[in-house]
Amino acid sequence: MSPARRRNPLVGVGATIVGAAAGVAAGIVADRATKHRAAMFALDTRDTYEVVPDQERVVLTDDGVTLHVEIDEPSAEAATAAAQGRTAHGRADELPTVVLTHGYCLSLRCWVFQRRALKAAGYRVVSWDHRGHGQSGRGEPDSYVVDRLAKDLHTVIDKVAPTGDLVLVGHSMGGMTIMALGRLDPRLVKDRVIAVAFVATSPGGITLANGGRRATIGKQLLGRLGPVVLAPLSERPELWAWLRRSNSTLEDFLVDQNSFASPVAASLVHYTTDILLSTPLDVINDYLGAFDGFDIRPALQHFRGTHVLVFNGVDDILTPPEHSELIIEAIPGAEHVLVRDAGHVIMLEHPDLLNAQLLDLVEGAVRARVEHLAVSQKPRVQRTMTNVAKERLARARTARPSRHARVAESKQRRGA
């Protein structure tokens, strides 16, 4: 048997397990991303997906973990424009700080588009990495639970946004963290939180990854084989690095099968994969127990009276619409926005739609604060949206001949 054939089973196991881990983390099966690979490249741009923060802070938790925090400060002109006509006295310091909390196996890098949009609109933005994720330090394995993450979020707020109104935005495990914060400190939510966006998340009470046969298989693979493979691989970084180098299709597997429900730019595929695979394997493994029997529905009562946006994809198999409906049922006046052809990593897949909803949410909450409007009197709204602009762009660029094709055609004509 050749060396290449001998190593294939090991590569396959590594790819399968990490793919399953990313499946629970990113939570979506997207066959259409494979079928429309041409559209993926048609959507590509020169975007580097970088955000240079105005401040970087290290926040120390009470159990000694260092949390990486980045702060984006708007220009004075943008902040003043946002405050005029919306706040009580038209001052920028009356605007809320927006705090972004990412999900399992991701990092603050997943908020690149939202950070840009919110800063440009005049709002101060705080992003942070969960313990064990991104640039934050590691905690003890038994600290990788949602209640501990809520304490971390509380500490971040205390250190970098100690005063003023807040808007909290959480994706997946980040949304669960916000819910747990409501239970940890109901007074903070009542006094300072004017709006919350729960993005592709769940309050628990029903099974995660219940979106179909493939989701079930992926979850079972991760539950049964994850501790057996992820932990040993985490102790062999050279082996893990070799697995990644050896399997040239790993990125396509992770993203096409586990991240999106529509074509995205090929460069965004690589960006997302880099975020996912930067999460240490032992951290992925140690967090798994955090979701067993998770049910924080009673904590949702603390967000009544707060402007709430619930935003998720129709094709999200980790936290499908049934999970969002539990939030809607518990919070009168909450707005539910569903997006067609959207998976779990929706803030990267359909950023323009989410950005527009977030800006409307913040602006509406600021105005309501000034005008003393009762949120509970808002009608319950559910809307289903399609990213028509993205579809048109993909079709237009796919139909346009590539530069290579144009050059070949030109040469052919000259030869004739």
Image: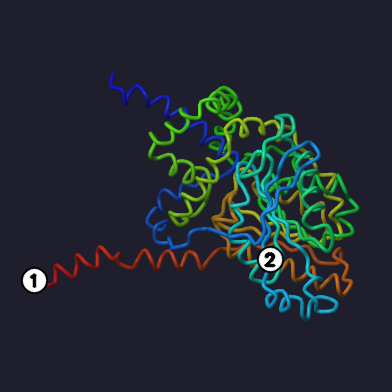
According to the picture, the residue beneath numbered tag 1 turns out to be 416
Q: CA distance from mark 1 to mark 2?
A: 59 Å
Q: Secondary structure at mark 1?
A: loop
Residue 53, by quadrant, is: bottom right
Looking at the image, residue 113 sits to the left or right of residue 252; the answer is: right
According to the picture, the residue beneath numbered tag 2 turns out to be 73
The residue that appears at 45% across and 57% down in the rendered structure is 265
Q: Which mark is residue 391?
A: none
Structural crowding at the residue carrying mark 1, measured as other residues with C-alpha within 10 Å and reported as few (<14), some (14–19) or many (≥20): few
Q: Secondary structure at mark 2?
A: loop
Q: Is residue 91 above or below residue 284?
A: below
Structural crowding at the residue carrying mark 2, measured as other residues with C-alpha within 10 Å and reported as few (<14), some (14–19) or many (≥20): many
Q: Residue furthest left?
A: 416
How far across and how far down the image is residue 100, in percent? 69, 55
Looking at the image, residue 267 sits to the left or right of residue 216; the answer is: left
Q: How is the image coloured?
A: rainbow
Q: Amino acid at mark 1?
A: Ala
Single out the mark in the foreground, 1 or 2.
2
Q: Is residue 39 above or below residue 206?
A: below
Where, quadrant-wise, is the C terminus in this rendering? bottom left
How far across and how far down the image is residue 138, in percent? 67, 36
Q: In front here: 332 or 90? A: 90
If you read the primary sequence from the N terminus, does the residue marked by circle 1 or circle 2 appear first?
2
How far across and how far down the image is residue 224, in percent? 59, 24
The residue that appears at 51% across and 68% down in the rendered structure is 389
Q: Amino acid at mark 2?
A: Glu
The residue that appears at 60% across and 38% down in the rendered structure is 24
Q: In front here: 280 or 14? A: 280
The residue that appears at 67% across and 65% down in the rendered structure is 357
